[in-house]
Every structure is written in structure tokens, then in C-alpha cells.
Amino acid sequence: MAGSVQAVPGFDLQPSSEQVALSTNYITNFDFLNQYLPDTYEKEFERYGNRTVASFLRMVGAEMPSNSDLIKWAEQGRLHTKYTNVTSAAAAAADTATLTINDTLVPGSGAIAIRVGQTIMVSANAGAATLYNKAIVTAVNTTAGTIDVAYYEAGGQTFGSAVVCSLFIYGSEFKKGTAGMDGSLEADDVIFENSPIIIKDKYAVSGSDMAQIGWVEVTTENGATGYLWYLKSEHETRLRFEDYLETAMVEAVPAEVGSGAAAGAGVTYKGSEGVFYVVNSRGNVWSGGNPSTLSEFDSIVERLDKQGSIQENVIFLDRQFGFDIDDMLAAQNSYGVGGTSYGLFDNDMDMALNLGFKGFTRGYDFYKTDWKYLNDPTMRGGINAGKINGMLVPAGSTTVYDQILGKNAKRPFLHVRYRASETEDRRYKTWVTGSAGGAATSSLDAMEVHFLSERAVCTLGANNFFIFED
């Protein structure tokens, strides 16, 4: 009988912070009638370890300034020409034909990128493997989106007039003493854009509470300690804000036309394109469970071959996805099934057996690392609908045209742009207002710590990313 983790007792999901009214937040539980004092542990116990989830963008990206409400960049298109929705007006066995290009053309171009004298291969999208021809282009009608071709094969066209085909250019042929190629092709970039969003938070404490000593020694993940409780609350607000700086870049979505956010009562929000949104829209999506066999990873490799073919890739994943990859790799070892040998070493009774893998090579180099954000039960860990198990991120950088620098520059595939100028830096702003804690900006008997950032994430080459959905 298989065992399982029991639901009760479980893990605490209730927030450990709360809003309190500063003017009424008085301590009222002093009890001098009890002559017995408890034996107390002064130091607060960190039962959840490091509670922050921010690490992803720091590991794979960079931060750089921007001084505009809109960030734009250009990405290269394909070098070679291929169309995948082509039909012939001629019947099978015809020596010549007029082919219609039904693909959606590049907006504003008004032309197809095929010229007279070029040689093409035409292949049926479905049917027998012999349904293909090679031909030379004899005429081009850019207005109608058609080309006239003459087939090289003596048997003529191998497919019928109703068959949907693909074609690509593989060269050209000209007769002796003829003029050169008619026309030329212009490189066409694909333009993408994103807008920064403003992220804010605040912590407030009354002057009286700042002067109140406590008996619990508190500590936070950034190492701050003390017996003043407001220090803990301020530090946790700061840590929470820093987490939001990353999770907002991962989860942000643009406000759709007609949505409440875009057309609310007197307010208009635009949102931003976070990493998950971009990869779902312009990247590669794996769904239906984690890939856990070599054949499934082979299909991922085949898709990457059709994209940028980036050699090194990092998979940020949740715990179960990591186990699935470990089990898949262990199964490749002839001693892995029913045994304990995962690697090329001699096991003995004093050895700590390593049952995990850091990465593997299968056409490309894949490295894996746990993404705490996907495991944390207060964030994406444990959710059902909309669950994401991991994301593959290409390593390295790509060349883009930087409008600020006015030239091509190397940029990580994933990086953050924050608003900044010579007089205002909005990467991470914090300031104190009120009349307590050293501040002297107003008559408010409190200290208010404000946090602000304005930023957007740029996902370059999203076609090289993979997102793994449940």
C-alpha cells in the first residue's frame, strides 16, 4: 500500500503581517498579578528558512537604465525565404505552373520575396514522400502574389492543383550573356516593445512604538537583528517589495482593450509584458505534464533546432519537474533500474549517494536549477489552474540595436530596464517622511518608509524560450 503526505497538519498560508491603526496600537497585556514568569527563548525561530523568492532575474539577467515610457527593440527575421501555404493552378504532370502564395505577407511590404531566375523546391505538406518538385521561377506577379515556374523533372508536377505545399529558395540559374538578378531584397526587422510599470510599497510606524522595547530578538533574511519590533516590520516590508520587483516582471500582463483595468472608472492602467506572458505568446509552450522521457526531450530539441539553436540552456523548474528529469536520466544507466548507481563510481556503505543531476547534453546543453518561486506555497507553488512547472531560458546574450546608445549592443536574452536620467534614478527609490526616526518632513507623529521602482522586463528572442505548463 502506497503512503502519502497527510493534509493535516499542513503548512501555514496565513500572512504573518497585518495592518494596524497607529493611534490605537497600544500594548494592553501587562500582567503584574502573575508572580511566575515564563522561561522564554529570546531569539525568534526562523521556521520557514529564507522566505524570499527573488533570485531568478538576478541569475539570468541584468539591469540597465531607460529614459522613456516606451521601450522598443528590433529582432532579426529569418535569413532564408520559405512559404508554407502554396497552391498550384496546374494539374499533376504539368511541365509549368502558376503557384499562388497564400501566406500572410509582411505587413506593408506588398511583395513576395521571390525573384525571376531563382530556383525553388516545392513539397506537398501532406501525402506521399514523393510529392515534390524542383523548379525555376520564370515570372513573378507581386500584386497577385503568384509566380510562374518551370519544373526540372520530365514527369512534371507531382501533386495536384488542390494540394497545399511549402516552397523554399535554394539558389538561382541564368543563361549565358544575360542581365543580372532583377530586384533586390531589403532586410526586415521585427519590432517589439514594452512599457515600464510603477511598483510601490510603504511601511509606517508611530513615534511611540519606535520607543517601545520588546523581549523578542527579531531577525530577517538580510541579517538585521534587534529588540525593536518595528525594525523587523520595516525589513520585511523591504524584502517583500524586493520580491515584488521580480515577480511583477515575471507575471505582468498588458491590460486588454475593453478590460476593467484599461477602461476603469476614471483610471486607466496599461500593464506590462512579463516573462510568462511573452513566452506564452511568442515562445514555445509544452503542456500536458512534464517531459520525462528522452523522446519527449527530443521533440523539444527539434523545436529548438527550428529556432535560434542556442547551445546552452537553463531550465528553472519546480521540485516535481526536477525529480522527473533525475528519474529520466537515471533510467539511462543500466545499473539505475533496481540499483543505486547513478554515476560512474563505486558505491559503499559510507558514501552519501547523489540521486540528482545538475544537467545533461542531448543535442544542446541543458542545466537545471530549482526555482523557489514555483515551489513556494504562498506564491505559485501548489496552485491548480494556471500551474507552471518550469521555464527554459537560453544562456548568453544577443545583439540588438540600443536606441540610447545609438548602436548595436550585446544584451542578455532576459534583462530589466528601469527608468533613470541624470537627475532621477527610479531603479530602487526609498525615502522617509514624517517626524520620527530622524525624518522632519511633516507634523505626522510617525515614520513612513516609502519604496518605489519603475521598470519593465525585456524578453529578447522569446522564440528560444520554453515554458512548461501543467
Image (cartoon, rainbow, N blue to C red):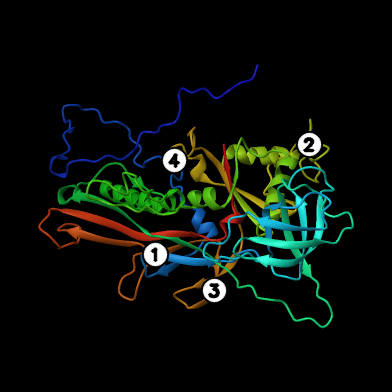
Determine which of the numbered discs, if any, sits on residue 274 in the image.
Answer: none
Label 3 SS: strand
Q: In front here: 339 or 173? A: 173
Left or right side of 24 for 75: right
C-alpha gap between disc 3 and disc 2: 47 Å
Q: Mark 2 points at which residue?
A: 336
Q: Position of residue 133 (x, y in %)?
A: 82, 56
Identify the residue at the far right of this view: 154
Q: Residue at x 67, y 49 (%)?
A: 358
Work out whether mark 3 precedes mark 4 in sequence or the reverse, and give the earlier one. Answer: 4
Which numbered disc, 3 or 4, marks the residue closer to the eye? 3
Quarter placement of the C terminus: top right
Provide the secondary structure element on which disc 1 rests: loop
> Which residue is found at the position 42% from the left and 59% from the top?
456
* For residue 136, side relative to residue 74 (left or right): right
The amino acid pointed to by label 1 is Leu
Q: In which quarter of the image is the N terminus?
A: top right
Q: Residue furthest bottom?
A: 177
Closer to us: mark 3 or mark 2?
A: 3
